Amino acid sequence: MIFGRNEACWCGSGKKYKSCHMEFDEKIREYKRAGIKVPPRKLIKKPDQIEGIKKSSVINRACLDYVSEHIREGISTQDIDDWVAKITRDMGGIPATLNYEGFPKSCCTSVNSQVCHGIPSKEDILTEGDIVNVDCSTILNGFFSDSSRMFMIGEVDEKARKLVEDVKEAMMVGVRAVKPWKLLGDMGAAVNSFCKSKGYSVVREIGGHGCGLEFHEEPWVSYVSEPGTGILMVPGMCFTIEPMVNMGGHEIFIDEENDWTVYTDDDSLSAQWEVQIVVTEDGCEILTW
Ligand code: MF3
Ligand code: CO
């Protein structure tokens, strides 16, 4: 639909289209004419939607902050799930992973050579030297937030500690490469070349995603993409930056028993950090961490 210049803008600002998003829409059309993939309007969040995502993110952060203060040797990954479930409910939210495509728990806990989608369990006890990713996602009033952090249990091997720290930096390399009117592939390429320079490999088959009004929206986000490829990043787009990085090779396999948990093929350690961002006029803002 083409908006009349003097009609109220589609973004809900109450301003006339011509003095609000008209120029923005024209700019997107120009890129499209040049053959570049551009985001449909539904991926461009309006200010009130960003506010909704930020409120959801308060719960997600509270969960991960609690985990960072209480995670220690001897607890089970089920204990982490119990904390996340309780905090989320107490704050009025719903854990987004629970029953998502059959996922049975309120967060993912991925230990050592588990790449992602580890299922919390009473049987899995954390021990000194483990590196653990806890991935939380929350629904509040229909708005989705998603982030994950790494935790180290007691004294951790120097190489493992370095992996955890380097992968956090890899995520930040991605964050800093988000620029409006640039291509998403440039961001993923920056993450990949940083990880390669450290001697690691980035997982190829699993990546990030648009997130906000649904758990997983377009675009799919690769961290091994080629520069000069991919969808145009424009202000208002929300997606996650969550590279999964292996100390050894990039190859992975999925646990046949539960059909969820992803492991490194060569049993090497894997680490991941995740934030959810919104593209702004001059870069991006981190909404969930
Ligand atoms: N937080 C994970 C993500 O980034 C959740 C994966 S879906 C699950 O998308 F069901 F496995 F949890
Ligand atoms: Co995610």
Image: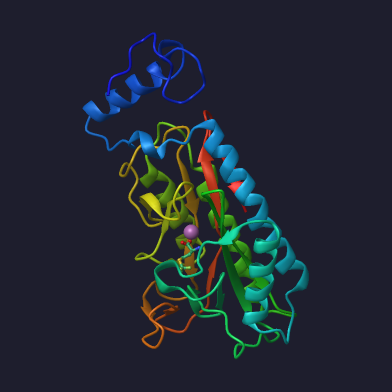
Which quadrant holds residue 183?
A: top left
Residue at 25%, 30% (x, y): give it: 32
Residue 199 versus residue 74: which sits nearer the camera?
Answer: 74
Q: Measuring 43% from the left and 19% from the top, which residue is drawn there?
A: 9
Q: How many marks?
A: 0
**Residue 163 visible at all:** no
Location of residue 43 in the rendering, given as x and y in whole percent from the top left corner: 40, 39
Q: Quadrant of the N terminus?
A: top left
Residue at 69% x, 57% y is: 91
Q: Position of residue 225 (x, y in %)?
A: 35, 53
Left or right of 184? Residue 277 is right
Instruction: In this rendered view, identify the residue nearer to me: 90 or 134.
Output: 90
Residue 185, how many percent across, how many down?
36, 46
Question: Where in the figure is residue 11, as x and y percent of width and height?
Answer: 46, 26
Q: Give residue 87's quadrant in the image.
A: bottom right
Q: Horizontal placement of 153 versus 170: left or right?
A: right
Position of residue 223 in the picture relative to residue 278 (left or right): left
The outermost residue toward the bottom is: 123
In the depicted structure, whether residue 13 falls above or below residue 65:
above
Which residue of the protein is positioned furthest toward the right in this rendering?
A: 69
Image color mode: rainbow
- From this view, report whether residue 57 is shown above or below residue 233: below
Q: Residue furthest top?
A: 6
Q: Is residue 41 above or below residue 107?
A: above
Q: Is residue 122 visible?
A: yes
